[in-house]
Amino acid sequence: MSLFVSAIGQGLLWAVLGVGLFLTFRILDFADMTVEGTFPLGAATAVAAISNGMNPLLATLLAFAIGAIAGLITGLLYTKGHIPILLAGILVMTACYSVNLRIMGRANVSLLGKSTLFKNHFLASLPQYFDSVFLGTLVMVVITGIVIYFLQTQLGQGFIATGDNQTMARSLGINTDNMKIMGLMVSNGLIAFGGALVAQNNGYADVNMGIGIIVIALASIIIGEVAFGDLTLNQRLVAVTLGSILYRFVLLIVLKLGFSANDLNLLSSIILALCMMLPVFKKSLNFKHILKRGLDTND
């Protein structure tokens, strides 16, 4: 039971990454590699701030702001510097590694004995692992609600139009460069926010904790879409959270089967690849079914 609750809690906390990446990967239609740098950047910022006496909530919000700045840099390199988005993201991601070392002063920093969002009287009174479930649910309800509301505004519709058809968006007077920059800022801000939450839940921050993050975030998106089929945009945002929880259950099953924790990144990549190829498998099966029916009819 405790492992079940822990998987739900972890899925809720990591779902922040899925929602953040959804804005660029699904709406703006490109994969932003900056997230592999902004996740540990958010963790490093929050842990360093908390270690120096800052309120955990303010430290977490500061992590969001720092992540948004990293997204701004990527956006400027992409839109104004005309550097391809993949390369722009890699450049900022690489730079974040040195920035993280500067912020923390060393490769990892512990929060042992420090106050965090998970260390308060109410959460401490809950059964084991229910603290992450409660806080994760609260965070995801707020974040998902804000994103859904934003996408329904005039600015949000301009953001969606930019991802759908840039030429049409420009003809309607939308500044597509600004939309891309805004999307990258909000996306990376959320990723850094998620990094701050995960670091506080784990009790430490490490400069290497961003490795493979984009695969985890993509898994939340893809598994949610595959599991729940055709959905509206708002429903897909909710499905990201559910996909993140399902992904944690898959990892839990894999570990129960005897695989090493060192294999998680490899297994995550395989799971994501299979999920992304599922439409191809379905199409192939449908084609074989149609072909078989045709042959049976001719007979």
Image (cartoon, rainbow, N blue to C red):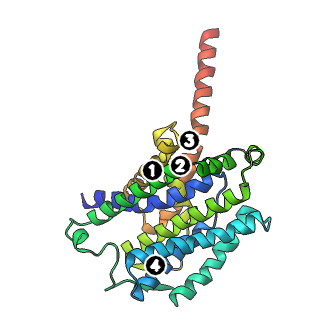
Checking the image for residue 243, the label placed there is 1
**Mark 1 or mark 3, which is nearer the start of the sequence?**
1
Disc 3/disc 2 C-alpha distance (Å): 10 Å
Q: Nearer the viewer, residue 261 or 233?
A: 233
Three-letter amino acid code at disc 3? Leu
User: Which residue is depicted at the point 49% across and 53% down?
Assistant: 220
Disc 4/disc 1 C-alpha distance (Å): 26 Å
Q: 126 left or right of 29?
A: left
User: Which residue is depicted at the point 34% across and 61% down?
Assistant: 9
Q: Is residue 160 above or below residue 187?
A: above
Foreground mark, 4 or 3? 4
Disc 4/disc 3 C-alpha distance (Å): 38 Å
Quadrant, the C terminus: top right
Q: Label 4, on which residue? A: 46
Q: Label 2, on which residue? A: 222
Q: Nearer the viewer, residue 294 or 276?
A: 276
User: Which residue is depicted at the point 59% across and 50% down?
Assistant: 156
Is there a contact, CB below 8 Å, between mark 2 and mark 1?
yes
Q: Nearer the viewer, residue 83 or 225?
A: 83
**Mark 1 or mark 4, which is nearer the start of the sequence?**
4
Three-letter amino acid code at disc 2? Ile
Disc 3/disc 1 C-alpha distance (Å): 15 Å
How many C-alpha atoms fall within 10 Å of the one at disc 3: few (<14), some, or many (≥20)? few
Q: Quadrant of residue 288?
A: top right
Q: Label 3, on which residue? A: 278
The answer to whether one can see residue 254 in this image is no
Three-letter amino acid code at disc 4? Ala
Foreground mark, 4 or 2? 4
**Mark 3 or mark 4, which is nearer the start of the sequence?**
4
